[in-house]
């Protein structure tokens, strides 16, 4: 199996490490805020972001993935753009999830248990699909976005980059959501969301 290094040793990093063991050997974390050679759940801190290229050149890891959450989308995107030109990024799909063979899945994607993605869906780079997400046919998820647990996305939906679609959000068919949108839990999206910002409610309304 290939060796995997994870940027970020917090809760998301530990979750990725836990779900990666069937397809990768996780060799450790890269974290600017943890002491090198210390351990998090028996995995070492390999160094900081500034050490990534040297670690890769020294064959410490084969592939990389980012475990930085939705509160830091700009950093998440910057790190992916910085390193993906020269370093392979892992795509990790939990074996209980169902991804149709017609789908296009980018690099750096993390898919948690119980996800169902139907025909001709495009998931771009550095996206997280959380537990129980369903995405119907012909939909599109833009780079660096987070799709929270139990989100239901109907067919022909287009979601932009760096979106955080909140838990139990429902998006009806043929809706476009612009980049940098967040939805609150249980939001129901029935029309295009054309302004970046936070939306809540049923039907969704713009908050800020």
Image (tube, helix red, strand yellow):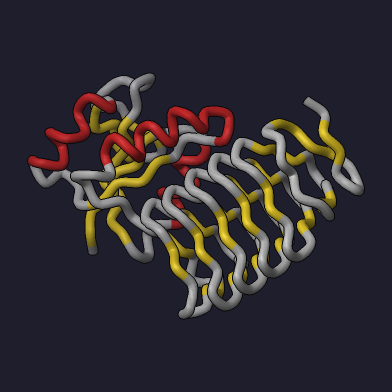
Residue at the extreme right of the image, as rendered? 202
Residue name at image x 12 percent, y 33 percent: 54
In which quadrant will I find the C terminus? top right
* Residue appearing at x 46%, y 80% in the figure: 101
* Residue 103, horizontal then vertical, whole percent: 49, 72
Is residue 176 positioned above or below 12 on the image?
below
**Is 35 or 4 nearer to us in this picture?**
4
Write down the quadrant of residue 121 in the picture.
Answer: bottom right
Q: Nearer the viewer, residue 95 or 40?
A: 95
Whole-percent x, y for residue 182 in the image? 69, 38
**In the picture provided, is 204 more to the left or to the right than 176?**
right
Query: Residue 207's quadrant in the figure?
Result: top right
Q: Nearer the viewer, residue 117 or 1?
A: 117
Residue occupying the point 28% across, 27% down: 49
Q: Residue shown at 67%/61% (left/top)? A: 157
Up/down of 48 relative to 69, above or below: above
Residue 69 lies, in percent from the top left, at 53, 35
Q: Position of residue 174 (x, y in %)?
A: 73, 63
Residue at far left of view = 58
Q: Nearer the viewer, residue 81 or 25?
A: 81
Q: How many marks?
A: 0
Is 74 on the left or on the right of 32, as rendered?
Answer: right
The quarter of the image holding the N terminus is bottom left
């Amino acid at each position: 199996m290939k060796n995997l290094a994870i940027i970020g040793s917090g809760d998301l990093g530990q979750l990725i490490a836990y779900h990666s063991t069937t397809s990768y050997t996780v060799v450790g974390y890269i974290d600017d805020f943890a002491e090198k050679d210390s351990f998090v759940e028996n995995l070492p801190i390999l160094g900081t972001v500034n050490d990534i290229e040297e670690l890769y050149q020294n064959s410490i890891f084969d592939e990389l993935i980012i475990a930085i959450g939705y509160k830091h989308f700009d950093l998440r995107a910057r790190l992916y753009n910085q390193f993906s030109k020269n370093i392979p990024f892992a795509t990790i799909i939990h074996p209980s999830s169902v991804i149709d063979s017609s789908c296009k899945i980018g690099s750096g994607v993390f898919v948690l248990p119980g996800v169902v993605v139907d025909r001709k869906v495009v998931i771009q780079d550095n996206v997280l699909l959380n537990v129980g997400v369903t995405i119907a046919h012909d939909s599109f998820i833009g780079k660096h976005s987070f799709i929270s647990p139990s989100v239901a996305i109907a067919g022909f939906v287009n979601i932009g980059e760096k979106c955080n679609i909140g838990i139990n959000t429902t998006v009806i068919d043929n809706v476009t959501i612009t980049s940098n949108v967040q939805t609150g839990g249980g939001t129901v999206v029935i029309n295009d969301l054309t302004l970046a910002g936070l939306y809540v409610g049923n039907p969704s309304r713009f908050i800020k």
